[in-house]
Image (cartoon, grey):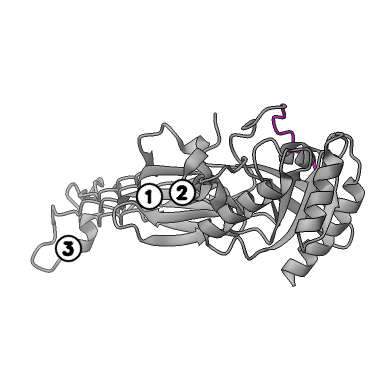
Amino acid sequence: MAFLDGIRIRIAAGSGGHGSASFRREKYAPRGGPDGGDGGRGGDVVLRTTTCVQDLSHLAGVPLFKADDGGSGMSAKCHGKNGGDLIMNVPAGTIVSDATTGLVLRDLDEIDADLVVARGGKGGRGNVHFATATNQAPLTAERGEPGEARELQLELKLIADVGLVGLPNAGKSTLLSKISQAHPKIAPYPFTTLYPQLGVTEVDYYGRMVVADIPGLIEGAHRGVGLGDEFLRHIERTRCLVHVIDASAPDPVKDYGTLRAELESYGHGVAAKKRLVVANKIDLTAAAAGVEALEGALDDEVVVVSAATGQGIEHFLERLSALASAAGA
């Protein structure tokens, strides 16, 4: 199933079990006192962040997520069984909102965090609770309370140390595959990457680093052109950005300007993040002039690599480690 970073779902907690209206039935007490037990509590609906899921696609196509109802009370003052909670796994970075009011309930930005989004109903009381001096054989027993029900809007914003940004076909996916165990789709044409990819790399001094590759951005991305605004939100949480530029392109300096303009227009602080400029595809003949043009036009250091051949990757990781360390300080 395709990557899904936003979904509206319906949830319902379990209803409480009904209380019992029963009486003791013993050999010498054919109509003894009330002994109806209470109903069990309904189960809660709980969202839990985990590394087992990467997006929200596993929640698609389900009309209602419902926890278990509580069991009814029984005779001999036996309580009904409590309903089981429904645990729904979501990736870290999921923002949970009430779909009706738009109120943000919580930003689940840590692993193994739990959020109860619907509470189960209380079980009804059995008739043993209603006996009085004047009514020693009550037939009254409470019905269980219904569980909470609501609609939620879930929105995922990936959590990563580094975000790879660039125009289509700049070589971001190839770079990600070279520095991590990620296996994104790679082909020599634009828009090969259709949804964000995560990779993990180990670098000296910094250690384990999570790198996010988002689909290529085009002019107007901040307004939603090419779904750019949908992709850009996934770099809001990153510590720093790597600007990947195709050095063999006709005008790499213009491409860099387009990229920076989109980041600045999108806002949310992404343009202000610490950055590293990478001139990719230096194995191609036309790249030498592109690297020279970038170095002449930019104040930033330009790190040259060939993601395809691996040239310059070791130096790139050293600079990336230093950048991430500085951004995390």
The residue sitting at 50% across, 50% down in the picture is 222
The residue sitting at 41% across, 52% down in the picture is 44
> What secondary structure is the stretch in magenta mostly built from?
loop
Amino acid, disc 3:
Ala
Q: Nearest the camera: 270 or 246?
A: 246
Q: CA distance from mark 2 to mark 1?
A: 26 Å
Q: Is residue 183 magenta?
A: yes
Left/right placement of residue 25 relative to residue 202 reads left
Q: Which mark is residue 223?
A: 2
Amino acid, disc 2:
Arg
Q: Is residue 97 magenta?
A: no
Amino acid, disc 1:
Leu
Q: Nearest the camera: 123 or 270?
A: 270
Q: Foreground mark, 1 or 3?
A: 1
The answer to whether mark 3 and mark 2 are in CB contact below 8 A is no
- Residue ID for mark 3: 131
Q: Nearest the camera: 262 or 46?
A: 262
Q: CA distance from mark 3 to mark 2?
A: 68 Å
Which residues fall within the magenta stretch? 180-187
Identify the element where label 3 is drawn.
loop
Q: CA distance from mark 1 to mark 3?
A: 43 Å
